[in-house]
Amino acid sequence: MTSRIDVKIDPLNLQAEFIALPAELARANQQYADAVEDFLQAEMVMERTTAQLTMEHRERLLMEAQAVAGIEGKKGVPARAVTVDQVKSAVESDSRWETVKLGYIACEVEKVRSRGTVDALQAKKDALVSLGAMIRAEMSADPTIRKMVSQASAVEWQGIADGRERKGSM
């Protein structure tokens, strides 16, 4: 199951956003690849189960039709043919088929959900690029924005330095 992602962007801390995004995107892509693999395996199981149950139910329905023909005293008269719809109906009402189908559906839902996560992170990447360009353009014209960004960067770097000092002193 995919975990929730954070697509919010802190415009004053774009550097941290740019640093974190590749790892988030790689993780989401791996989850999507895993979901696709699970889906394809579930699809294969679904097809195999459907084929096995189709043969089983076709054989059973043919035997029942032959038994009815024998009971009615029509020896030598071929049994009524079993239709494709009868076999399909018997297969789809089988609890084994239903169990496999529910697993298949769950895998497909997870695949779509994982794809959505990758798409959201791609949109975040595009937004970061646009926002970074916009802030750079504004910074060149507005000293207030330049000051806010430099203060945010200084606080971030101070936090990193404090973390190193704490680790070194322990």
Image (cartoon, rainbow, N blue to C red):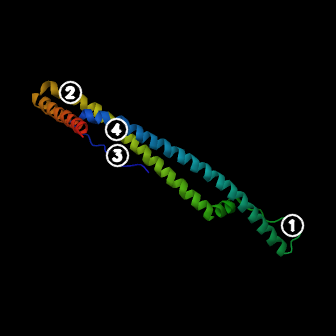
Does the image show residue 92? no
Q: Which of marks 4 and 3 is nearer the N terminus?
A: 3
Residue that carries the numbered disc 4 in the rendered image: 123
Residue that carries the numbered disc 3 in the rendered image: 5
Could you tell me how far apart the alpha carbons at marks 2 and 1 are, in whole angstroms?
A: 88 Å
Q: Which mark, residue 136? A: 2
Residue that carries the numbered disc 1 in the rendered image: 77
Type of the residue with mark 3: Ile
Q: Quadrant of the C terminus?
A: top left
Type of the residue with mark 2: Arg
Residue at the left extreme?
Answer: 144
Residue at the front extreme?
Answer: 170
Query: How far across and how far down the image is residue 102, in percent?
Result: 54, 58
Does the image show residue 120? yes
Could you tell me how far apart the alpha carbons at marks 4 and 3 are, in whole angstroms?
A: 12 Å
Query: How far across and how far down the image is residue 48, in percent?
Result: 66, 52
Type of the residue with mark 4: Ala
Q: What element carries label 4?
A: helix
**Relative to 159, is 142 above or below?**
above
How dense is the environment of label 4, judged by Cα within 10 Å: few (below 14), some, or many (20 and up)? Answer: few
Rendered residue at 48%/47% (across/down): 111
